[in-house]
C-alpha cells in the first residue's frame, strides 16, 4: 500500500499517552473558551495533531499509529482530564478512522492520503433516501449530532438504505462523503459538552461511489457475522466484527473516565488548601469523616469504571487479533460495561461535588463545567444504562432473540 502523505514516525501507546498527558494543561486553560465558542479551539486541535493523537486508529501503512482499542481508550481518557469536549471529539474522530479501515482499499487511500484528514460520523439519520446511479448512489438526508464536524474532512454516515440492483438485495450501509459536499447546520445548543460541535450534516443528492459504500446485512450487525441464508459474509476488513462496539468503548467511555478523574483531581487540590466547611465545626474539610468517605467512594467508582472499560476494550482487542466474531453474551457484556462506566462516573462526580460544597457551582469554577459535561455525555443514547440492563435481562432469562445494538 502506498500513501501520498509524508512518512511519519509510528509511536507506541506509552509515548502517545505521555504526549496526551503533556497537552492536558493547555486543554484545561482553553476549556472555558472551547465551551463558549461551541467548538474545540484551534490551539487544542493543532496541539493534538502535532502530538499525533488524531492518528491513533489510522493504519501504520498510511502514516498512523495503529494502536489497539485498549490503548486508544487510555490515551483519550487522559485528554478528558483536561477538557471533556476535546476528549470527546478526539475519541470519536479516531473511531471514524477506525471504521474507515473496514472500507475497500481505494476508499482508505482517499481518506488516509492525509492521515490527519479527520472523519466524523453519525450512525442514525433521518429523511434518508438514495438513488442508484452508474457507479454508486446519490445520497440525501440529515444526520444529527456529528461530533467534531467543525474539524473533519470526511463524514461517515450510517443507516443509508441501498436499493436492490444488479442482483444485489436491498440492504442498509454506511457511506463516506467529503465534508465539502455537505451542509453543516448549526443545531448544537446544549447545557453540556458544548464544545463538541455536534451539529447536523445535510446531504442533497451527493454522489457516493461504490468503493465508498460499505454494505452490510442485518446479520452482520445483529447476528455476529452469520450470513443470510447460509451465505458467507464478505470480509470487509480486520475490524468489521467490532466496529460498532469499539465506537462505544473508546468513543464514549474514554472521555467519561477522563472527566471523572478531572473532577477528582480538582476536588483533592481544593481540599489540600485546607478550606473549612461552612456551618460546621470543621475548619479543615479533610478532617470530616463524611468528606473522607465521599472522596473514597468517588475514587472507588472511578476505579471500578476503569476496570469495566478495560475489560470491554480487552475483549474487543482479542476479537480483533483472532478475527473472531463476538457472540451475543460478549456483545451484551460490552454494552453493559460501557453503561456501567456512564453511571459510575456520573455518580462519582456527584459525590465529589458534595464533598467540595456549593462553591463548585460558581461560574468560574471548572467543576461546574465538568458536572454539566458529564451529565450530558453519560446520557448518550447508545450507552443508555436502562436499555443496557434490559438487553442483559432478556438474554439472562432466555426471552427470545436479543438484538444488542438496535436495528
Image: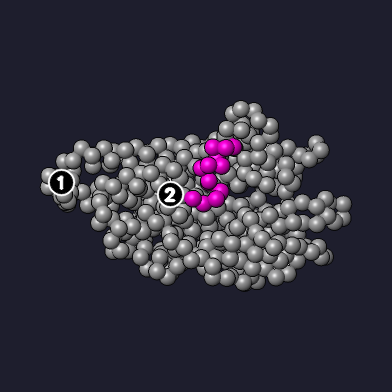
Residue behind mark 2: 256
Question: Residue 49, can we see it?
Answer: no
Horizontal and vertical percent position of residue 263: 32, 50
Whether residue 242 is situated above or below residue 398 in the rendered picture: below
| Left or right side of 352 for 214 | right
- Magenta extent: 379-391
Numbered disc 1: secondary structure: loop
Q: Is residue 179 magenta?
A: no
Q: Residue at x 33, y 41 (%)?
A: 298
Packing grade of label 2 (10 A; few <14, some 14-19, many >=20) is many
Residue 161 or residue 236, whichever sits in front = 161
Reading the chain from its start, which is encountered first: label 1 or label 2?
A: 2
Circle count = 2
Q: Residue at x 35, y 65 (%)?
A: 32
Q: Is residue 377 visible?
A: yes
Residue that label 1 marks: 280
Q: Nearer the viewer, residue 115 or 310?
A: 310
Amino acid at each position: 500500500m502506498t500513501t501520498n502523505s509524508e512518512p511519519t514516525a509510528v509511536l507506541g501507546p506509552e509515548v502517545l499517552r505521555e504526549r496526551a498527558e503533556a497537552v492536558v494543561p493547555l486543554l484545561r486553560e482553553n476549556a472555558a473558551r472551547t465551551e463558549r465558542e461551541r467548538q474545540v479551539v484551534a490551539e487544542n486541535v493543532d496541539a493534538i495533531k502535532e502530538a499525533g493523537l488524531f492518528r491513533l486508529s489510522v493504519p501504520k501503512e498510511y502514516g498512523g499509529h495503529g494502536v489497539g482499542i485498549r490503548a486508544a481508550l487510555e490515551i483519550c481518557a487522559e485528554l478528558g482530564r483536561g477538557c471533556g469536549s476535546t476528549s470527546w471529539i478526539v475519541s470519536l474522530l479516531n473511531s471514524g478512522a477506525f471504521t474507515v479501515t473496514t472500507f475497500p482499499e481505494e476508499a482508505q487511500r482517499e481518506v488516509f492520503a492525509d492521515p490527519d484528514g479527520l472523519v466524523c460520523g453519525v450512525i442514525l439519520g433521518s429523511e434518508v433516501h438514495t438513488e442508484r446511479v452508474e457507479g454508486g448512489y446519490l445520497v440525501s438526508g440529515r444526520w444529527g449530532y456529528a461530533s467534531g464536524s467543525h474539524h473533519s474532512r470526511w463524514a461517515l454516515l450510517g443507516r443509508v438504505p441501498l436499493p436492490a440492483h444488479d442482483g444485489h438485495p436491498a440492504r442498509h450501509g454506511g457511506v463516506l462523503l467529503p465534508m465539502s459536499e455537505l451542509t453543516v447546520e448549526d443545531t448544537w445548543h446544549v447545557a453540556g459538552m458544548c464544545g463538541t460541535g455536534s451539529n447536523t450534516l445535510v446531504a442533497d443528492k451527493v454522489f457516493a461511489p461504490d468503493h465508498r459504500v460499505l454494505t452490510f446485512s442485518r446479520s452482520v450487525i445483529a447476528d455476529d457475522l452469520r450470513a443470510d441464508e447460509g451465505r458467507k459474509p464478505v470480509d470487509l476488513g480486520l475490524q468489521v466484527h467490532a466496529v460498532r462496539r469499539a465506537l462505544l468503548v473508546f468513543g464514549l467511555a474514554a472521555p467519561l473516565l477522563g472527566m471523572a478523574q478531572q473532577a477528582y483531581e480538582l476536588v483533592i487540590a481544593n481540599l489540600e488548601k485546607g478550606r473549612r466547611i461552612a456551618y460546621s465545626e470543621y475548619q479543615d474539610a479533610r478532617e470530616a469523616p463524611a468528606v473522607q468517605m465521599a472522596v473514597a467512594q468517588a475514587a472507588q467508582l472511578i476505579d471500578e469504571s476503569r476496570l469495566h472499560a478495560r475489560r470491554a476494550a480487552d475483549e474487543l482487542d482479542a476479537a480483533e487479533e483472532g478475527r473472531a466474531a463476538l457472540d451475543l453474551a460478549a456483545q451484551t457484556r460490552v454494552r453493559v460495561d460501557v453503561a456501567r462506566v456512564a453511571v459510575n462516573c456520573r455518580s462519582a462526580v456527584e459525590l465529589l461535588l458534595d464533598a467540595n460544597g456549593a462553591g463548585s457551582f460558581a461560574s468560574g469554577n471548572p467543576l461546574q463545567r465538568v458536572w454539566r459535561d458529564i451529565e450530558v455525555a453519560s446520557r448518550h443514547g447508545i450507552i443508555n444504562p436502562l436499555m443496557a440492563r434490559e438487553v442483559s435481562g432478556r438474554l439472562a432469562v432466555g426471552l427470545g432473540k436479543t438484538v444488542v445494538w438496535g436495528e
